[in-house]
Image (cartoon, helix red, strand yellow):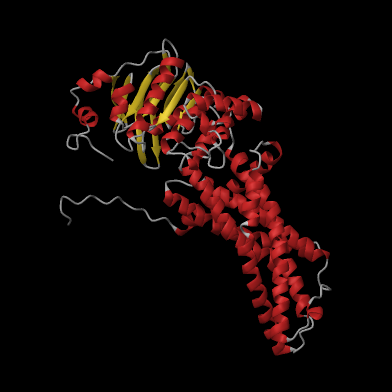
Amino acid sequence: MMIAPLSKHPGEGDVIVRFDRIRKSFGDKTILDGVSFDVRKGEVFFVIGGSGVGKSVTIKHLVGLLRPDAGDVWFDGVEVSRLTEEEFFPVRKRVAMVFQYATLFDSMNCLENIALPLEKHRGLSRGAALVEAQRLLERVHLGRYGERFPGELGDGMKKRVAIARALTLNPEVILFDEPTTSLDPVSARRVDTLIRELSDTLGVTAIVVSHDLTSIFGIADRIVMLYRGGVRAVGDRAHFRETKDEVVRQFVGGFADGPMEFG
Amino acid sequence: MGSPLETPQPLVLHERPLVKLGRVALDAVSGVRALVSLFLRTLWFTFRGSRPKGATALQAFEIGNRSAPFLALTMAFIGMILVYQSAVQLGRIVPDYSMVGANYAELLVRELGPTIGGLMLATRVGAGMAAETASMVVTEQVDALRLCAADPVDFLVVPRFLASLVMTVVVIVLCSGLAYATGALTALVAFDVRLDVFVNLSLVDFGDVATGLTKSLAYGAAIPICSCHCGLAAEGGSAGVGRATTAAVVLSSLAIIVINFFISASAFLVGL
């Protein structure tokens, strides 16, 4: 199994995000034990692995929602894991996140949900923020639903509103935490198409946590597989299809029987 | 001797009582520190933050309007029970009910109205606040807020704090009035105490009103702080929300009792 070596100078070349020997424990349970990989500018990069292996935990380190016990997280040449909450604000303007459950605020309609980061991060007036929010809502093909509240939308639509909210600050990187989970196949493919479009048309780097094999083999440029606290494999789709690693083959093949350990 | 397949049991060192006591004390100190920190941050954002328009009014409706029927019913029955029991006890000593209304008014204004009302609000409002904020934590909405550069304290705690400050006082004053009315009716029906005799505010002075209002205000501040503290500290899924809700009711109720003691003692010391 080959793991791409890390270059010595983070931020050099086309690497925009680097996780370098990340360790993270919750209580006495170690989730990440020396996870290292790079993400290149503009690519759609999937983080895959079994449930509870620490995929979401890994990407949350990039926006300061979690702090590593050891190791470094680099974003565009800057080590960010030890920044304070306020120092993270500039990073969060450049790195957005779409959470697993869409996380729209129930007390706000779709336009207000999207306008919030525009008001808070960019200091736009309420009116200007709502105009911009409408434009973003149209980009995800939900222009007619601005006045609707999250409770009135289906899961797929909520995900797309969340993606519109993530786009508000023109981020360079968007983290997607299981974007197609709980969606019907059609909605899931629409979300996949949207992620691919963002990368192809806007040059956004997408880091996607997913179990969805159709998504993974449909839109990924490169993939990392986490297993037992570390990196099991990194490579492109062809590498994962042709790998001889039995654990990786079991996962990407979706086989119940095999050497893969769970829990 | 166990079979070779048995997992060796880890050596458990039992904590000495003093160590355990120390740990409990340290936990208590850190809990109080977290509450004080949340209170100070709430005050800071009250003056410096920028919340969504209408958030405070929405919370005021939730805390005030939606709690009023529950609190009114509770206080109405408590008013009847208290007057009935007081008159029965009094009748065993001196069968003169002329001062029942006056004593009841003083007790209601200074002590019972705010404290019983506060405890009732802690169960209804505190549980709701904790459940809502805890749900937002476990479904990552609070994380999403942080990524939007919206501070969860400014966004979630401050509207509830401001609404609770105002509505707790309003609801307690109104429901105490209702408790007084049901008490008067009880005295009339059960003990033939005429309304003009019962309605006697001669024992209620400025100190009683000031103490009662201060308590109501303090409870109005304590309930959202305790509840949101528990909600924001929630971990896990629905079980975490349940634990946070229970903890919020317990902590808010405890805070009300402790605050009651300190305000009563302070009022006594300054001669109110």
The foreground one among A156 and A26 is A156
Q: How many marks?
A: 0
Across and down, in percent, residue B40 comes to 66, 43
- Figure check: A14 above or below B249: above
Q: Is residue A220 left or right of residue B2?
A: right
- Could you tell me if residue B26 is visible in this image? no
Q: Residue at x 51, y 22 (%)?
A: A94
Against B240, residue A237 (above or below) is: above
Image quadrant occupied by the C terminus of chain A: top left
Q: What residue do we see at 31% from left, 37% from top? A: A51
Residue A124, picture quadrant: top right
Q: Nearer the viewer, residue B59 or B138?
A: B59
Which x, y percent locates residue B160? 63, 48
Q: Is residue B67 visible?
A: yes
State the residue at coordinates (42%, 38%).
A155
Residue A108: x and y in percent read 57, 39
Choose top left, top right, bottom left or bottom right for residue B172.
Answer: bottom right
- Assign the N terminus of chain A to one quadrant of the image: top left
Q: Residue at x 50, y 43 (%)?
A: B136
Asked if B82 appears above or below B145 in the picture, the reply is below
Where residue A160 sits: x, y (%)? 45, 31
